[in-house]
Amino acid sequence: MERGNLRDFSKLKAVTLDEADQMLNMGFKEDIDKILKKVKETTTSPPQFLLFSATVPAWIKALANNYLKPNWHMIDLAKNLKDKT
């Protein structure tokens, strides 16, 4: 985006972040926020936002609250297993 290679998000239908917790752990929060804000501002209709994460700390939920629809759902594939790794 900063180099001008990505400019037009108007027809974007979905945004997927895999390993969102790891990206944020590595210090990419500001970059992710900048990208998602630009997408949200420039799309003609709101895209579907998907976040995939092995762990769901409070800051992942905060990111989800900022960019996902108010009625977003968390799906826990490991359910109540003792060892979720």
Image (cartoon, helix red, strand yellow):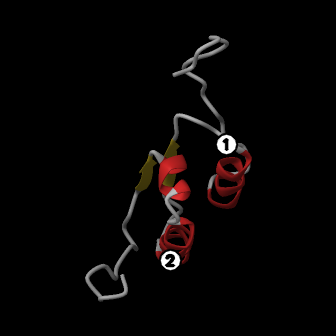
Residue 34 image point, x, y percent: 52, 76
Q: Is residue 16 placed above or below 37 in the rendered structure?
A: above
Number of other residues with Cα within 10 Å of mark 1, as a class: few under 14, some 14 to 19, many 20 or more: few
Mark 1: which secondary structure?
Answer: loop
Q: Is residue 60 placed above or below 34 in the rendered structure?
A: above
Looking at the picture, which amino acid does disc 1 mark? Trp
Are the residues flagged by discs 2 and 1 in contact, CB closer than 8 Å? no
Looking at the picture, which amino acid does disc 2 mark? Lys
Picture quadrant where residue 29 is located: bottom right
Residue 54 image point, x, y percent: 52, 34
Q: Determine which residue is flagged by label 1.
A: 72
How many numbered dots are placed on residues in this image?
2
- Going 38% across and 64% down the picture, which residue do you hit? 12
- Going 68% across and 43% down the picture, which residue do you hit? 57
Observer-nearest of 81 and 3: 81
Which tag, 2 or 1, sits closer to the chain's start?
2
Observer-nearest of 9 and 22: 22
Give the alpha-carbon distance from disc 2 to disc 1, as whole Å. 20 Å
Mark 2: which secondary structure?
Answer: helix
Which of the labelled discs sits on residue 38, or is there none? 2
Horizontal side of residue 16 vs 41, given as left or right: left
